[in-house]
Image (tube, rainbow, N blue to C red):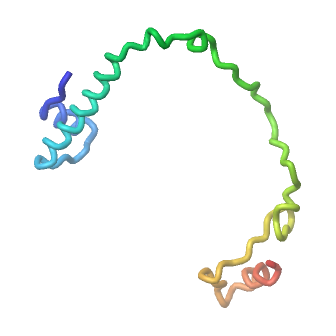
């Protein structure tokens, strides 16, 4: 199987992708290279590699509804908590606005 320039133009127009006419031969060559690799993969004989694992379904874990239990509490992993949330210090590059007392209060409580 081979891709032609008209095929690429048609698909590009259907997908509304702008494709430069100067780039068209490169795209055609890339797509034909990909199809060549796929053709080579299809010709590989894998019949001697067949084993019983390929025909047996994979065992999957049961779906469990609910929260995943942590090995440690959230409070043990955070330097500071307030009302069940992590308190994160403000970055130096994100200074609090001068007129915002709430932002200054959060900065004062952060470690």
User: Residue 46, how many percent across, how many down?
Assistant: 42, 14
Q: Position of residue 97 (x, y in %)?
A: 64, 86
Where is the N terminus found, in terms of image quarters? top left
Depicted 12 relative to depicted 55: above or below: below
Q: Furthest-bottom residue in view?
A: 98
Q: Which residue is drawn at 56% across and 14% down?
A: 54
- Is 26 positioned to the left or the right of 92 in the image? left
Question: Which residue corresponds to the image point at 23% horizontal and 38% vertical from the top-left?
Answer: 30
The quadrant in which the C terminus is found is: bottom right
- The image quarter in which residue 69 lies: top right
Where residue 28 sits, quadrant-wise, is top left
Q: Residue at x 38, y 13 (%)?
A: 45
Q: In this orientation, which residue lies closer to the viewer: 94 or 53?
A: 53
In the picture shown, does residue 66 fall above or below 57? below
Q: Is residue 98 left or right of residue 15?
A: right
Is residue 78 placed above or below 93 in the rendered structure?
Answer: above
Furthest-front residue in this view = 48
The one of 23 and 96 positioned closer to us in this rendering: 23
- The image position of residue 109, as x and y in percent, is 82, 80
The residue positioned 56% from the left and 11% from the top of the image is 51
Residue 85 relative to residue 39: left or right: right
Q: Is residue 80 above or below residue 111?
A: above
Taking the image as shown, residue 42 lies to the left or right of residue 96, namely left
How many badges with numbers are in the image? 0
């Amino acid at each position: 199987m081979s891709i032609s320039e008209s095929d690429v133009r048609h698909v590009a127009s259907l997908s509304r992708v702008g494709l430069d006419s100067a780039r068209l031969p490169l795209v055609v060559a890339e797509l034909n290279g990909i199809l060549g690799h796929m053709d080579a993969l299809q010709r590989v004989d894998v019949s001697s590699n067949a084993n019983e694992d390929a025909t047996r379904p994979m065992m999957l874990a049961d779906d469990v509804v609910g929260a995943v239990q942590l090995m440690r509490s959230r409070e043990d992993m955070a330097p500071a908590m307030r009302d069940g949330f992590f308190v994160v210090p403000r970055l130096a590059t994100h200074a609090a606005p001068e007129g915002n007392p709430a932002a200054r209060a959060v900065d004062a409580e952060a470690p």
